[in-house]
Amino acid sequence: MLGSIMPPSVTLRRVEIALFWGGLALTVLGAVMMAVPAARFAPPAIVLGAGLAALGLNVLLGGDFIAGPRVRTYTARGQVVRGRAEIAAGLADVVLGGAPGDRVATVSFGPFGRPRIDVEEGMANVRLAAPKFPPTLARWRADLASNILWDLDARSTLGSLSLDLSELRLERVSARTTLGGLRVVCPVTRGLTELELSSTVGPVEVVIPERVGAAITVATGPFAAVRQKNERLLAPGQRRYVTADYETAASQVEIRITTSAGDVTLA
């Protein structure tokens, strides 16, 4: 079953959208007028200032840059034992965690496009993909059921990924960013989870809870640093880290991290 919830404040949202696009247009126009004297029909500083003021008011009203309609919430329920979640966020930030109650998945997604949530014959497929146009800058949230075994594939370009996997049952996780940050809290549920994490420029942070045994391999470019802040981790080899209880821990994670220029933090 799939449903949606629409927030009520339509008029305010339209004002916020008008402020964003009007402010952006004035800011660009002011910058062009400064660079091209022939294009000046008004003092460029006033045009630029008006644009920045409109953008500032947009943030003040919405708490963030509001460029389009609000995100919408979708919920799926059903009898499911296995699932796959795919996220292609583009410019949007994504927060992922565990879903409460009997829900297979709850996602807040948008403002453009629509997620795909299919539940059929015990298998759930959740897909969140940002449309190519218009771009979405909103923050997405995806909550997945903790009693289902999931495979997760998440990727972004400018957006950041914040994946709290602590309550989830997972077999494989692949998460990739280009410029956005990547933060992962490892699952504490029983079994082995394989995680492939990669970044081009954005920082990578991996949090290893107390009861989790971890084996980590890190490959970095010449401009990236590794910060080891978890006292449980040993370093038996170059760019290799392992907890002393890895072999005997009920919850195990095997993590491979690849980054070109983004720093890596192990916490």
Image (cartoon, helix red, strand yellow):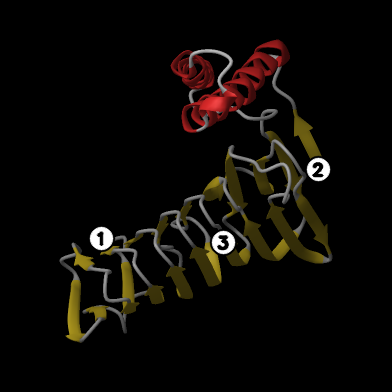
In this picture, residue 54 sits left or right of residue 132: left
Residue occupying the point 47% across, 13% down: 46
Residue under circle 2? Answer: 2
Q: Nearer the viewer, residue 189 or 260?
A: 260
In this picture, residue 203 sits left or right of residue 229: right
Amino acid identity at mark 1: Ala
User: Mark 3 Cα within 10 Å, few/some/many (few <14, many 20+)?
Assistant: many
Q: Is residue 78 visible?
A: no
**Could you tell me residue 22's position as x and y percent?**
63, 21
> What label does residue 155 carry, if any?
3
> What label does residue 98 carry, if any?
none
Q: Secondary structure at mark 2?
A: strand
Which tag is nearer the camera, tag 3 or tag 2?
A: 3
**Could you tell me residue 265's position as x and y percent?**
27, 62
Residue lying at the far left in this picture: please name it. Answer: 231
Tag 2 and tag 1, C-beta contact below 8 Å: no
3D distance between C-alphas at marks 2 and 1: 37 Å
